[in-house]
Amino acid sequence: MLVAERHSKIVQIVNEKKSVRVAELSRIFSVTEETIRRDLERLEKEHKLSRSHGGAVSLTNGSDTPETPYFEREIMNVKEKKEIAEEAVKQVEEGDKIILDASSTAWYMAKRLPDIQLTVLTNSIKVALELSGKKQITVFSTGGIMLPRSLSYVGPLAESSFDNYHVNKAFLSCKGFHFTKGLSESNEQQARIKKKMMDIADSVYMMIDHTKFGVQAFTNIGKVDSVDHILTDSNVDQETITRLKQHNLNVIKI
């Protein structure tokens, strides 16, 4: 098999399976794992896939379920997201250095932030554009590989950009919050970004509506105790609230 043909088939397999390990590709093509690693390195440079620990993931979805397009997320649970965003803004003080992720809730939050002295780090194109009209807010955008479905930057450049900073507060969302399995995302690249965001923040605010509790999505972000505050809506049941408080989380319920 020609190298070009093998590369084409590797991309096809990764896109079909969403993620695949080096050892599996080595068996399929009867070549060494070192050869596969070189193949994946080249294909990543050509923006045909993204390498992960021990394998590769698809750039089309990056998960077992496609990442929901931004225009769809904007109209899902809008009332709850707007209310959560408004409450999140109340947690921001002048002079803060904060992170906003690429969630639609973070975008609603950006729309409501007052034009005061703030520093905002984000991997979201929509958040950066929304804040561009607020003269007192300094915006740092990560750069990286742009994902059209989420209008966000991911990849090694986006991840490494956070290594240079420290912030007071990170305002994030996620696909799933499971008391045993932890926090999770549908997209591995987004999960890696959010881990970085959480690592450099003094306090982590997770903005999630009631539909996210008990859900385990494709890729793990971190344990429940990696979060400090939960911003959620009034539809969350009392049992969930009690369990959150048992984990020493500050619950801010709308």
Image (cartoon, helix red, strand yellow):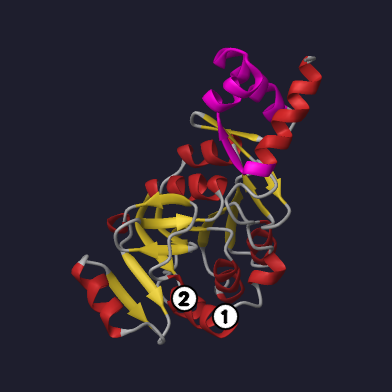
Mark 1–mark 2 CB contact (< 8 Å): yes
Q: Is residue 37 above or below residue 246?
A: above
Q: From which residue to which does the magenta span run?
A: 16-45
Residue appearing at x 43%, y 47% in the figure: 195
Q: Quadrant of the C terminus?
A: bottom left
Q: Is residue 68 above or below residue 46?
A: below
Residue identifier under label 1 = 77
Residue appearing at x 64%, y 70% in the figure: 73
| Residue 28 within the segment the image draws in magenta | yes
Q: Position of residue 29 (x, y in %)?
A: 66, 20
Residue appearing at x 57%, y 52% in the figure: 64
Residue identifier under label 2 = 211
Q: Quadrant of residue 126?
A: bottom right
Mark 1 and mark 2: Cα distance apart in space: 9 Å
Direction from residue 229 to residue 175 in the image, left or right: right
Q: Earlier in the sequence, mark 1 or mark 2?
A: 1
Please rate how many residues cluster around mark 1, counting C-alpha atoms within 10 Å: few if below 14, some from 14 to 19, many from 20: few
